[in-house]
Each structure stands twice: as structure tokens, then as C-alpha cells.
Amino acid sequence: MAATPLPGRTTQTASRASLGRAQLQVRWDRVSVLVALVAVLTMVLAHTIVVAVRDDLRAPEINPAPIEAADQMVDTPQKCPPPTSGIIHTAPPIRAEAGASPRTVALTFDDGPGAATPHVLDVLQRAGVHATFFVIGQDAAANPEMLRRIIAGGHALGDHSWSHHIPKAAAGWNRGKLAREIEHTRRTIVDATGLEPCLFRPPGGIVKGAGSVTHAAGLSTVLWSVDTRDWSVPSKGASTFASVIRKRAALGLTQEHPVILLHDGGGNRAATVAALQEIINDYRAHGYRFVTLNEPR
């Protein structure tokens, strides 16, 4: 005789089976969520590792120098040597360089930047010669691009006051006025080039009262040993004045380290430009090496 299941028992068994399936379904949902989370975390971790490795590979290009070297790079290029106690009249000698001539010459140009400055720079570039330019602040402020071109050509810049005011030789400089003129021009040079001038040439060569001011400003005072007086172009015979400038410049051929005074501003400097290549040829023919005045002494 077949047993007939009780109605209550059949219902209970079916309920348990349904509950088990529901619980199993819930567990699979949790597993799916966990798997998704693990996948996301894995992707994030992998991305982080890739970025870190990539940055490590790029780091030497971005900042190849150690911190100490970086600090030195900020300070060193801007520093001037301690100012000299006296007045500089000679070009720096060449130090222990095999086969080099012991004689040096420094070409210097005052009163620019002016209309002749680009032509002077062209001659110097073709000749492969570096020179020193003492600029007037107010003219430099009006033409900062020319200061940048001077530096780009490997030349040196010096301070020649702001207004080129020349005091009476007997009275000398008003120290307060000179300090302001020097500082104003210094700031103009720094703003245009990022470089500090280390040299000052007083307008007119007047040094009385200037020493303490320039020394306090950290500048060495520079004059010259050969004056070409190229600014004194005569009203007659201007076309032949270049030969006069050349002969005057040649007076330095008797000196070991002459400093030649020329001008690239302050008037018509066509004769100076015309004489410049011949001046360079004369000194090269006598074995001189051309230097700038900011080179080590």
C-alpha cells in the first residue's frame, strides 16, 4: 500500500528548497560584486604602477641635477667676483693655455645701444671676436632686445650710468646721484638679460667720488689704456676718419694687455664701424688674443 505524503510535509520541503535556492542566489550576487571590486582595484593598482614607472623613467630628463647642484645653478651664474680695489686699465691675461699668446686686447664700446650697435655686432661676429659694451641705462631700457643680442653673441655688458651725465672733474660725482644712476642701469640690464653687470665705466672717465659708490654696488671700475677718440668726427674729412681711428687704436700694439676705447652710440659711428675690421686685423697680425673684461684675472 503506497504511502501518501502528508500535505504539511510536502509544503515544508518545498519551502526549504525555495529558501536554499534564494540563499544560493544571494551568495552568487555577493561573489559577483566582490569580483567586480577586485577587478577595479587591480586596474587602479596597475595604473598606479605604470604611472610611477613612467615618471621614474622621465625624472632624469626633468631634473637631472641633484638638489645641491640646482641651488648652485641659481646663485653661481649671477655672482660677480669681488670688486677690484683699484681702477682697471688692462685686459685680463690668458691663464695657462697651451700655445696661447701671452698678449691680450679688449675692445670696448661705450654709449650704446645705438644705431651703430647692430653693425658693430655684425663685424665682431664675422671676425669671431668678443667685446665689452658699456651701455647707457636710458638707451638700454628703450632697446632691451639689443642687450639680449649682445649677450647672445658672447659679449660682456657693463654699466655706463643711466643718463651719461658728466660732472666737472674738479668736483667729481655726487655719490647719491651716482648710486641711483648705477642701480637704475643695473636693474635695466638684469631685467633685459637676467645677468648682473660686474663692471662700471664712469662717463667722461671721471673717477673722483666714484670709487666708494661702485665698490658698494659690487662693481669694478674700468677705464682704458688707448682712447681712439672716435666720437670726435670732424665736420670735414669724415670719409677718411676711419683711418685716423685705426691709427689711434694701433697705439696699443706697444702694450701687453691694452683696453681700446670705442663707441657704438652717441652719434654717427659709421667711421668706427668702417675701422673696426682693420683694427682687429692689426692686433691679430701682432699675435694678440681678444678677450672681454669680465674674464678672470
Image (cartoon, grey):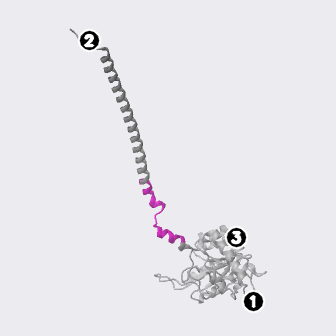
Q: Main secondary structure of the magenta part?
A: helix
**Residue type at numbered disc 2:** Thr
**Extent of the magenta region:** 53-74
Which numbered tag is attached to residue 11? none
Q: Which residue position is annotated with label 3?
A: 141
Q: Which residue position is annotated with label 2?
A: 4
Is residue 212 highlighted in magenta? no
First in sequence: mark 1 or mark 3? 3
Q: Secondary structure at mark 1?
A: loop
Q: Which residue position is annotated with label 1?
A: 171
Residue at the limit of the structure toward the left, as seen here: 1
Q: Secondary structure at mark 3?
A: helix
Give the quarter of the image for residue 111: bottom right
Binning the other alpha carbons within 10 Å of mark 3 as few (below 14), some (14 to 19) or many (20 upward) gives: many
Report x, y in % for residue 192: 64, 68
**Residue type at numbered disc 3:** Ala
- Assess whether mark 3 and mark 1 are in contact (beta carbons under 8 angstroms): no
Q: Is residue 127 above or below residue 90?
A: above
